[in-house]
Amino acid sequence: MLRGLLTVILVVVLVAGVFVVLRDDGVLEQVTADNVEQALLDNRVPAPLAACMGPRLADRLTIAQLRALKRAAPEEGERTIPLTTKEVTERFNRIDDREAVEQLALAAGACTFDLMLEGR
């Protein structure tokens, strides 16, 4: 009987551990700067800027916030790169996460400034 109880406890602990590891924000879904950089490149951010922004965003945003930023991707009928203030505003409004937008803007601004100083 004790052996059966220990087996049940072990199974429950293992299932709970698997849930923690495999859930959306679990260990298996860690964000790396390379993932963020590639997502920026996929959205036509220039390579030097993406290389600078990737580590900053990966360090400062949660996985949920990084997912929220994906909502700024162009939808059907939209330009790849927003060219007007209205288009930019509409995309930022879709993100619906003020902190994520702030961190994106801060990273873009800081990296642009750094790259200007480096002469790139």
Image (cartoon, rainbow, N blue to C red):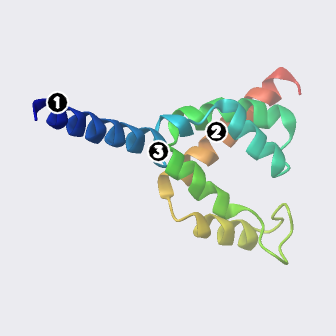
Q: Earlier in the sequence, mark 3 or mark 2?
A: 3
**Mark 1, other Cα within 10 Å: few <14 / some 14–19 / many ≥20:** few
Q: Which residue is mark 3?
A: 25
Quarter placement of the N terminus: top left
Q: Residue at x 63, y 32 (%)?
A: 32
Q: Is residue 19 visible?
A: yes
**Mark 2, other Cα within 10 Å: few <14 / some 14–19 / many ≥20:** many
Q: CA distance from mark 1 to mark 2?
A: 56 Å
Q: Is residue 114 left or right of residue 93?
A: right
Camera-side residue: 97 or 17?
17
**Helix, strand or loop at mark 3:** loop
Whole-percent x, y for residue 86 in the image: 72, 73
Q: Residue furthest top?
A: 118
**Helix, strand or loop at mark 2:** helix
Q: Which residue is mark 2?
A: 107
Q: Residue at x 81, y 30 (%)?
A: 116
**Helix, strand or loop at mark 1:** helix
Mark 3 belongs to which amino acid? Asp
